[in-house]
Image (spheres, grey):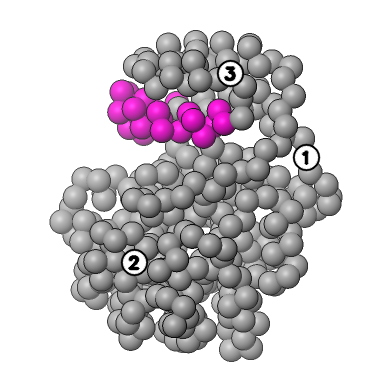
Amino acid sequence: MVLIDKIQLPDFPLLLAPMEDVSDPPFRAVCKDNGADLMFTEFISSEGLIRDAMKSRKKLDIFDYERPVGIQIFGGDEEAMAMSAKIVDTVNPDLVDINFGCPVKKVVSKGAGAGVLKDIDLMVKLTEAVVRSTSLPVTVKTRLGWDDASKNIEEVAERLQDIGIKALSIHGRTRCQMYKGKADWTLIAKVKNNPRIKIPIFGNGDIDSPQKALEYKNKFGVDGIMIGRAAIGYPWIFNEIKYFIQYGEMPAPPDIHQRIAVIKKHLHKSIEWKNGLSGILEMRSHYANYLKGFPDIKQYRNKLVQLKTIEEIDETLLEIEKKYSGFEFERIPIELINYHEKCAI
């Protein structure tokens, strides 16, 4: 068992990473169904919460079936972070997570996200302000450092633990790397193996298969793994990792009936959450990822992104299900989508 304060997670838990414009309640619902042990909201601007911005407030929506679930906030001002933590308290998540890793320019330029990696003293002050302002466990998600010359994650881990965070998730790249190159887990392992570190350490970056998850579990000794991009269009990745760790072999890939069932649940949850047409429009960006690898799927994919009623979409999904019934899906490498304008640390 892995403990984040009093939150009980299974041995070697699998976490769904907070991803802007992706990890909303409908997406989290299908990931939870398929084995995610701990999930996080999209990251929320502390300034937006204080201004009562509608988009920021909407991201606070959580549901009991998701638990345990954390709300992630970001910002570069102590007072704003403290006030936003108090607002987060009111919706009763299981924990508050602080984003110190988003590399996107519009976030970094405001001295937030990975921008804070340039100033460790500020990172400590911001974190301490949140810890003081909430009764919830506080966790942090960050990167190795700003660039190759300032990989300071070992110092960061000790200092943040000392002021009261209950877990740390580390993406194995610097801010300057964005999502390029290979994630370096050696420093994540050093943090985990530091005798001073008592809190759970979760690794993140480049996990795109059950085989790699098991390899990294054994090689780097982390308490669990956070998965982001590999779950987009393929939420089955969580249960596949668990199966492979337990039995040492790969389960059969999801068949057409399982795939369509997940798409439909995602769609219907999106419509419930976003109220009608907005939910239909929100879902359009997901079809290409769910239907990747289907032969001759283009005509259906193009049709799905034009339809405007749930009845028409359900009918088209039924057509797809019938067309590919009995089709033997081959396991294809999961493509890690490269975010340039979004944030998926």
C-alpha span from label 1 to label 2: 37 Å
Q: Do the residues labelled 1 and 3 touch (CB within 8 Å)?
A: no
- Left or right of 54, for residue 259: right
Mark 1 burial class by Cα count in 10 Å: few <14, some 14-19, many 20+? few
- Going by the numbered disc 2, the residue's amino acid type is Gly
- Going by the numbered disc 1, the residue's amino acid type is Pro
- Left or right of 288, for residue 329: right
- Left or right of 280, for residue 317: right
Disc 3: which residue: 296
Disc 2: which residue: 113
**What x and y, as percent, mark residue 336?**
54, 48
Foreground: disc 1 or disc 3? 3
Q: Say which residue appears at 58% left-offset and 23% top-offset.
A: 260
Q: Nearer the viewer, residue 212 or 256?
A: 212
* Residue at the left extreme of this rendering: 51
Q: Which of 271 and 86 is in front in this view?
A: 271
The answer to whether residue 203 shows anywhere in this view is: yes
Q: In which quarter of the image is the C terminus?
A: bottom left
C-alpha span from label 3 to label 2: 41 Å
Q: What element carries label 3?
A: loop
Disc 1: which residue: 251
Q: What element carries label 2?
A: helix
